[in-house]
Amino acid sequence: MKVRELRWEDFPALVENYYALYEEVREDPDLGITLPKERPTMAEEVEWFAGRYRGVLDGDAVVAVAEMDGRAVGVCVVDRKKVPECQHIGGLGILVARSARGQGAGHALLASALGQCRGKFDIVTLSVFATNSRAQRLYESFGFRRYGLLPKGVLRGGRYIDLVEMSLEPPRV
Ligand SMILES: CC(C)(COP(=O)(O)OP(=O)(O)OC[C@H]1O[C@@H](n2cnc3c(N)ncnc32)[C@H](O)[C@@H]1OP(=O)(O)O)[C@@H](O)C(=O)NCCC(=O)NCCS
């Protein structure tokens, strides 16, 4: 497994990994990631991918990709907030394909992405399901601290799930 920059050829694998979440959430209603109600169209996926790619070029995003056997199996994205007075903040998201979890990809992605955040973002934030203790432990091991809890932050299948809000100040370069 290696972690590297985003490449154009990652598009099909990243879309496949994301689409697979719709199957997974049916089997595991506790899956710790929020999804749009409908699976995004391919056109929307193109927009998402191009937006991240552009963000990297503009200095407004950090993207790390985990590759196994020549295929993108995970991605970590930190996007600059759009509101002018909050542009010192980056919002982090991470996803590792089901078949590749538990092998260190998440850890390696965070190490790479947070390293790239140095000097780019003063604060990195994320939201994590209160039920996702494995992800919370992972974030805490990188220095993320809980700054809040949004009770009933997610409504899935008629059930509320609390959202834990976490933040980290990456060391300046
Ligand atoms: C959360 C997620 C990104 C972690 O990625 P991963 O590649 O599975 O993580 P790693 O293999 O690097 O393991 C991270 C930590 O979890 C632990 N871990 C791995 N598999 C585990 C398991 N089955 N049960 C409990 N802990 C486990 C590891 O020991 C490791 O801890 P360490 O750093 O102290 O050794 C990944 O599971 C995922 O994408 N989940 C679905 C989407 C999601 O929840 N995203 C987070 C949204 S906030």
Image (cartoon, grey):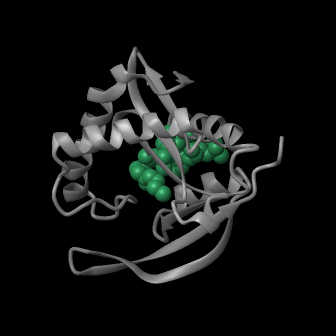
Label count reads 0
Residue lying furthest top: 70
Provide residue 102's location: percent of width, then percent of height: 49, 39
Is residue 152 left or right of 21 when viewed as pictured?
A: right
Q: Is residue 117 above or below residue 152?
A: above
Q: Is any atom of residue 97 visible in this view?
A: no
Residue located at (50% from left, 81% from top)? 150
Q: Quadrant of residue 160?
A: bottom left
> Front-most of 161 and 72?
72
Q: Quadrant of residue 114?
A: top right
Is residue 26 left or right of 62 when viewed as pictured?
A: left
Residue lying furthest front: 84
Q: Is residue 82 above or below residue 76?
A: below
Residue lying furthest bottom: 151
> Front-most of 129 and 121?
121
Quarter that holds the C terminus: top right
> Front-most of 97 and 47?
47
Q: Is any atom of residue 117 visible in this view?
A: yes
Residue located at (37% from left, 23% from top)? 8
Is residue 98 left or right of 163 when viewed as pictured?
A: left
Provide residue 38's location: percent of width, then percent of height: 16, 58
Provide residue 40's location: percent of width, then percent of height: 20, 50
> Front-most of 81 and 131?
81
Residue located at (25% from left, 61% from top)? 36
Residue located at (17% from left, 52% from top)? 39
Q: Is residue 148 above or below residue 16?
A: below
